[in-house]
Image (cartoon, rainbow, N blue to C red):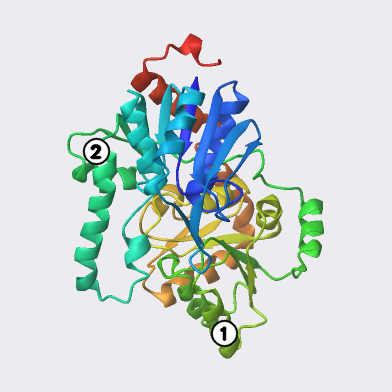
């Protein structure tokens, strides 16, 4: 089967949609399918490469380095030429932004089947605007409209979780919205033997005995990382919090942590290369995800696959991954005292970590990338009318 992916980001970007698209495209390529990804070039300059069996076409783009966003301008002609040459059986878009819109339009003109996965929730943008709760509602309504105008034109719609499907389904009453996990590479992210973990602690210059919590993701308002600073100031455990990621709030939170005297207990690592992430998880003791607007959270899946117990917001899709007392603990994302109590309880329950690690790994294996690939293969065959015997071409 030949599949074209389109979206705003792809590897080496490490945001959720980029990780999902890259993992799925490469999993399909490993199974003998042909895969192409069409995305804006992160640096704005047109280039192409083959990455782990996937043809990546990075289109000319206008880049905002402050926001970390690249946007294609009128890519329709080149997109059409790429589809003509590649001759896909199905197209899979990841968002409602200009590149995906152009690919959708070109695919429709050629009578191609189009699948879409929605990774977007309006709060991702609205929470970063200087608006009060009531003022955000019309903004969020407009943002949902921009999603619906694209996704109602598709042959099939998927989302990463049951929670995400429940949000989108009422807005697409004529579509069946299917929940398919983004998946996680349980080979790359896995528990490590004690000796290897000790070596990794030394490599990352982490204390041998103090408990180490890890956050991985954007450092923007919607991710609620500021709550973790307040929580850490209210509890002595965990001894150290690692914040891996970059975003608009990074420098502000660094300054805030320094002024609060948390320099020795919070390390802002900035951007961490994808190749180093599995080792960083393995070197940590527990994971924390404070965001209230996660439609799944690939970072949380990676932590679970690595055998880390998780303290997560009781919001969004996180309760689908984190079960109280089984794979970790949940807290109110608006309550710093609750977050502090959750961190303190999890960091102080060392005797429970092995049991939680086994359950965490088992939960992650339910979301293995192989299962995700199989679900999408079936969906592609359904919309494109491709027989299973013809998929490895």
When asked about the image quadrant of residue 148, the answer is top left
Return the x and y of residue 57 as percentages of the image width and height.
55, 39
10 Å crowding of disc 2: few (<14), some (14-19), many (20+): some
Q: Nearer the viewer, residue 338 or 156?
A: 156
1 vs 2, front mark? 2
Which residue does the image show at 76% across and 48% down from the upper left? 193
What is the secondary structure assignment of the residue under circle 2? Answer: loop
Return the x and y of residue 316 as percentages of the image width and height.
36, 55
Classify 206 as above or below 319: below
Disc 1 target residue: 255
**Residue furthest front as drawn:** 77
Which residue does the image show at 53% across and 85% down from the upper left? 256
Classify 227 as above or below 170: below
Q: Can residue 340 be seen in this view?
A: no
Which residue does the image show at 38% across and 46% down from the upper left? 95
Q: Can residue 213 be seen in this view?
A: yes
10 Å crowding of disc 1: few (<14), some (14-19), many (20+): few
Relative to 329, 362 lies left or right: right
């Amino acid at each position: 089967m030949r599949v074209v992916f389109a979206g705003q980001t792809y590897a080496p970007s490490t945001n959720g949609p980029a990780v999902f698209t890259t993992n799925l495209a490469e999993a399909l390529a490993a199974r003998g399918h042909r895969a192409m990804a069409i995305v804006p070039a992160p640096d704005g300059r047109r280039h192409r490469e083959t990455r782990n069996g996937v043809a990546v076409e990075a289109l000319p783009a206008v880049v905002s380095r402050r926001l970390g966003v690249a946007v294609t301008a009128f890519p329709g002609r080149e997109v059409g030429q790429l589809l003509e040459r590649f001759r896909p059986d199905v197209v899979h878009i990841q968002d409602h932004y200009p590149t995906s819109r152009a690919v959708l339009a070109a695919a429709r003109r050629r009578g191609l089947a189009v699948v879409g996965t929605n990774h977007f929730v309006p709060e991702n943008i609205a929470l970063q605007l200087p608006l009060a709760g009531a003022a955000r509602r019309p903004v969020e309504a407009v943002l949902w409209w921009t999603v619906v105008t694209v996704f109602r034109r598709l042959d099939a719609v998927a989302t990463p979780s049951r929670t995400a499907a429940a949000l989108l389904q009422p807005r697409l009453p004529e579509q069946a919205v299917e929940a398919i996990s983004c998946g996680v590479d349980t080979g790359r992210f896995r528990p490590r033997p004690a000796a290897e973990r000790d070596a990794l602690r030394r490599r990352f210059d982490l204390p041998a005995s103090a408990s180490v919590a890890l956050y991985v993701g954007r450092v923007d308002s919607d991710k609620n990382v500021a709550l973790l600073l307040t929580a850490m100031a209210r509890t002595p455990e965990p001894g150290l919090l690692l914040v891996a990621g970059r975003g608009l709030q990074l420098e502000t939170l660094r300054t805030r942590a320094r002024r609060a005297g948390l320099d020795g207990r919070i390390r802002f690592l900035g951007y961490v290369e994808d190749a180093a992430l599995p080792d960083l998880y393995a070197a940590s003791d527990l994971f924390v995800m404070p965001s209230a607007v996660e439609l799944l959270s690939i970072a949380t899946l990676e932590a679970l696959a690595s055998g880390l117990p998780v303290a997560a917001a009781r919001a969004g899709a996180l309760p689908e991954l984190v079960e109280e007392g089984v794979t970790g603990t949940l807290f109110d994302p608006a309550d710093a005292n609750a977050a502090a109590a959750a961190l303190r309880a999890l960091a102080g329950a060392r005797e429970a970590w092995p049991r939680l690690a086994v359950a965490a790994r088992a939960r992650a294996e339910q979301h293995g990338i192989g299962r995700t690939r199989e679900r999408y293969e079936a969906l592609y065959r359904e919309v494109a009318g491709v027989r299973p015997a013809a998929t490895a071409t």
